[in-house]
Image (cartoon, grey):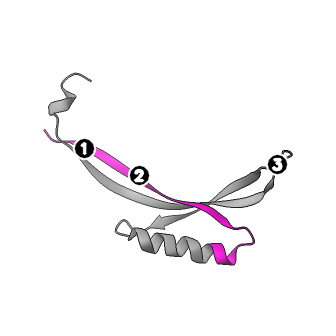
Amino acid sequence: MKGAENMTVSKNPTSLKLSMDVENGTNALGAMQTKSTSVGSVRLDADAAKCLAVAEAIGELMSHAVVNVYVTEKAELDKAE
């Protein structure tokens, strides 16, 4: 986009989602398979360490081990005029 390098853009987070990949058995070749589960409505100011602690606590309640934890941010981009 021509001229975009001089444009001022602000990023305004609108929502966060906590997602986890959990073990879900193995495939025909013996490799681990995973499935995803998520928790929406995470506070926008949530601390990363607390998000991880929540994921680990949820993992303790599940019958499958947590493999990966992600926080997905949805944000609105606004350009200054």
Q: Quadrant of residue 13?
A: bottom left
Was residue 60 drawn as part of the magenta stretch in this picture?
yes
Residue 37 part of the magenta-drawn span? no
Q: Position of residue 75 (x, y in %)?
A: 36, 50
Please name the amino acid that badge 3 sits on. Asn
The residue sitting at 49% across, 60% down in the picture is: 17
Q: Quadrant of residue 48?
A: bottom left
Q: Which residues are magenta?
A: 59-81
Q: Residue at x 39, y 70 (%)?
A: 46
> Marks 2 and 3: which is nearer the front?
3
In primary-sequence order, the first of circles 2 and 3 is 3
Marker disc for residue 74: 2
Which label was assigned to residue 78?
1
Give the labeled residue for mark 3. Answer: 27
Q: Residues within 10 Å of mark 1 (few under 14, many from 20)?
A: few
Q: Residue at x 51, y 75 (%)?
A: 53
Q: Earlier in the sequence, mark 1 or mark 3?
A: 3
Give the image quarter of residue 14: bottom left
State the residue lying farthest toward the top: 2
User: What amino acid is labelled 2 in the image?
Assistant: Lys
Task: Work out how far the residue at label 1 is from the one at label 3, CA to CA, in angstroms.
Answer: 45 Å
Q: Secondary structure at mark 1?
A: strand
